[in-house]
Amino acid sequence: DFLQQTFNELAANRPRNSNAPQFSYGTSGFRMESSKLDIPLFATSLITVLRSFYCSEFIGIMITASHNPPQDNGFKTIEPHGEMLPHDWEPHVTAIANAVYEGEYLNFEKLFLLIADDLLKGVALEKSDLKIILGRDTRDSSIKFSTFLNNFFNKLTFLNKKRVNIIDYSIVTTPQLHFIVRKHTLNAENTKMDLPKEYFDAFFKPFITLLAQVNIQSFKKLVIDCANGVGALQLEQLLPLYEENSPSLKLELINTNYQDCSRLNVECGADFVKTNQHLPSGISHESTIKSDVLFCSLDGDADRIIFYCLSKDKEFCLLDGDRMATLIGEFFIEKLPKELLSLIKLGIVQTAYANGNSTSFITNDLNLDVKCAKTGVKNLHHDAVENFDVGIYFEANGHGTVVFNDKFINALSSYNLKQFELFISLVNQAVGDAITDLFIVVAILLLLQLDPKDWFKKYDDLPNKLIKCVVPNRAAFETYDFERKLSKPVGLQEKINYIVAETDNSDGKNRCFVRASGTEDVVRIYCEASTDTRVQTILAKVLDAIR
Ligand code: 16G
Ligand code: ZN
């Protein structure tokens, strides 16, 4: 039948690799050293075919390993409306990838047909079209994977050629691909669009209009670290348009060498700055002596951003995802009429990594609801949509955005808040987006006339540290309570509780948790407390307990 035919053809391209590790499709798709990605690529292709039949719409595939080093890569699929693959399909992608690895052709065939048959129940396969949109980051290996995918899908003959439509957008940011897949679906558009134009008309034009309305005082220059990745390629197209109106806020791009993939995320980018808490390479001395400069760093696929500035005595001040969430929350409270605020649920979603003092600030100073979600944009996005009319979500590492529902948009429309409406059009609601988050944060700082140094002074972060530890089997670490506690290995949580309590904890601020990474073969240990010494003491003991 149709599925068998589909399988025969798809499986003709099956890669063979007998010593590959176990694969797992997590919240950020497959990600690992690029030489090990043949099978994950094949599994991604198979699931994309099934998903495209299932949705009978465009499905996107993004080739990127985000902030990982240049030699890594990865894949994730994008839903017709810009979301990520539904949770309940993830185990199927994982199962397919691992069945290829086990090498038994017949088992693999059986498994694939079983899964496909089950997932596609009720779908009129004979009428199905295959509609796929491709995008990739600037890595060298991304070109190879993208060529494979183009060949793989275009060679298929089980479908009438008229029913196969593969659109390749080449080098784009991850959020741009989410945006354009959604746009294809909403507009029922089957031919390639001018992505930069669509994207910049949607977000950049309102930003320029808004800037023209404000008196730029709080800072004079924004230095953007592009991590030597795709953000540079995209922002370089914007710069001439930006400068046309000779704005008094200057933009400077640094780390823009996206042609040399070996420099991607090296000594620069959002992850480097957040982890090391210091300036990336490439910042000029002149920028650092002026105090009216705001800095930011994108990651390798431009879906996350971190801000920072220097205090009067040149101390590094990190303005991370927690600070962006609180800034946006404060802006909504400040700019919206009390009456409107009383009608809607406005709240913030964080993860266990959010600094304890940011959570206290949200609850006690902003008086907003705060929810904790498991790590991964997908989880935060879901909780923001489920719990709030206006849901602000950010991971501390700078991944996040704002989502609004119709209730809020309708309520807002009965007030005549033109500038606020312009502001919310800057938001890419599909997914966290470094470029639109940049527009949002800059707009808020200017509209509130807030100096970045005063943004930093809103609350003090608790001293904290995140370390990793290699363990024989990270799957043995299972968590509950949104990753804040361990259920397995049995007994370890009790030991952590004991360590946290026995270290001076007079103010009750000690906090430590352990979780298995979803992107690296390690477990992560996070700790915060009122002093660095306490953090160090707790971490050393917990590390001992794990080993
Ligand atoms: C992925 C997630 C990111 C999360 C990180 C945690 C997406 C798009 N990306 O990069 O949100 O912070 O994983 O990594 O969801 P970890 O599991 O290795 O700590
Ligand atoms: Zn990223």
Image (cartoon, helix red, strand yellow):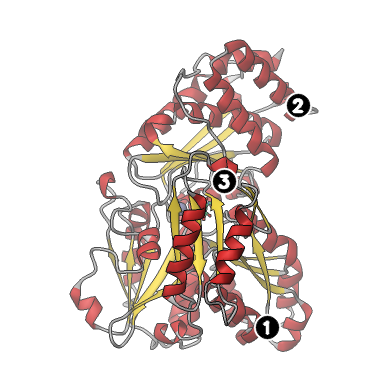
State the separation of the CA atoms marked 2 and 3: 26 Å
Residue type at mark 3?
Val
State the residue position of label 2: 118
| Frontmost residue, 416 versus 344 | 344
| Frontmost residue, 260 versus 506 | 506
State the separation of the CA atoms marked 1 and 3: 37 Å
**Relative to 176, does residue 367 appear above or below in the rendering?**
below
Task: State which quadrant residue 513 falls in.
Answer: bottom right
What residue is shown at x 43% (from left), y 49% (from top)? 66
Q: Dot 1 surroundings within 10 Å: few (below 14), some, or many (20 or more)?
A: some
Lower position in the chain sequence, tag 2 or tag 3: 2
Q: Nearer the viewer, mark 1 or mark 2?
A: 1
Query: Label for residue 181?
Result: 3
Lower position in the chain sequence, tag 1 or tag 3: 3
**Relative to 432, does residue 363 appear above or below in the rendering?**
below
Task: Determine the residue located farthest toward the right in the rendered image.
Answer: 122
| Frontmost residue, 311 versus 146 | 311
Lower position in the chain sequence, tag 1 or tag 2: 2
Task: Determine the residue located farthest toward the left in the rendered image.
Answer: 285
- Secondary element at tag 2: helix
State the separation of the CA atoms marked 1 and 2: 47 Å
Quick check: 317 left or right of 338? Answer: left
Relative image position of residue 373 (x, y in whole percent): 65, 60
Residue type at mark 2?
Asp
Q: Are marks 2 and 3 in contact (CB under 8 Å)?
A: no
